[in-house]
Amino acid sequence: MQVIEAVQGLRRHLVDLRQDSIALVPTMGCLHAGHVSLIRKAKRLADVVVVSIYVNPLQFGEGEDFEQYPRTFEEDVRICEAEGVDVLFHPHNLYADDGAKITLKVHDMDCVLCGASRVGHFDGVVTVVNMLFNIVQPNLAVFGEKDWQQLTILRRMVADLHMPVSIVGSALIREKDGLAMSSRNRYLKDNERQQALFLSQVLRLMQQLALQGKTNKHILDLGLKYLAKSHIQVEYLDIRHEHSLLPSMRMPLTTDRLFVAATIGQTRLIDNMPLLENLEKVE
């Protein structure tokens, strides 16, 4: 495995590999089993796998955890080597010394869910992903479904800007107790870790209500009541169309998705699930 820090060095290294298909797995490091699943999917789909590790300052807002974001580069290198990654791209900085003067802008799709409170976050995401696409020029890029809003926005970016890259989603990976895997889970204290389980539990409850034919309003009301009992600071709990991110219709549809974000202690967590997961149970 080659570990490369410079943009030009990476471009030179990839010149001789262009005859093969190249997959990019963009990450911010602190790799866990969820990231490993992305790498393994990339290896199944392409001849060459490039993993990038870059904690992108442009997607962190004021008061967010950019400085405290966990950085475990040595362990990340070991994981990538063990998984057979071909190139680990680890730039120190991707922006000009005087800052980012030209960036991409997300319209409408960033005003809901996580974007409502994290103003400018998805502008930072699409800007840095576009930069990585320009540098690596991959045939495909693999992103996790845990951040479904991000995945949806990136798919729209590629479509709107006619980028020659296929965006591949990879299933959300959970801990044995149901908690969605996240680099931020390490911030949770033991009692907070137990509280965090309410997030996946309430989504499962809402799925059951959907299977019973309850209206989306009824499903949301009961979900919010359940979360209120857990004393969790809920940012949002919502049902939206999985592709447009628009509000759902009155009755559950197969294109509806459940979204939740909450702060537990000092840690912000997100989760999502399809509203109608077990279609065979729907009458």
Image (tube, helix red, strand yellow):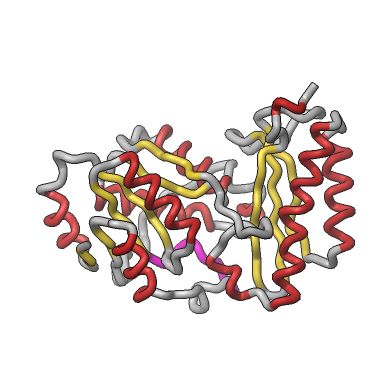
Image location (x, y in percent) of residue 226: 87, 55
At 75% across and 50% down in the image, what residue appears? Answer: 237
Residue drawn at x 48%, y 44% is 170
Q: Nearer the viewer, residue 101 or 130?
A: 130
Q: Quadrant of residue 185?
A: bottom right
- Whether 35 is drawn above or below 153: the answer is below
Residue 261 rendering spot, x and y as whole percentages? 69, 57
For image coordinates 71% across by 52% down, the residue present is 260
Side (left or right) of 100 relative to 230: left
Q: Main secondary structure of the magenta part?
A: loop
Q: Is residue 273 left or right of residue 171?
A: right
Q: What is the magenta range?
A: 54-63
**Magenta run includes residue 170:** no
Residue 63 lies in quadrant:
bottom right
Number of callouts in the render?
Answer: 0
Find residue 143 and report its horizontal and vertical position in percent.
45, 48
Image quadrant of residue 239?
A: top right
Q: Quadrant of the C terminus?
A: top right
Relative to 180, 134 lies left or right:
left
| Viewer-proximal residue among 44 and 102 | 44
Kindly identify the residue that appears in the image at 36 percent across and 60 percent down. Answer: 101
Q: Answer yes or no: is residue 103 visible.
A: no
Percent x, y for residue 266? Answer: 68, 75
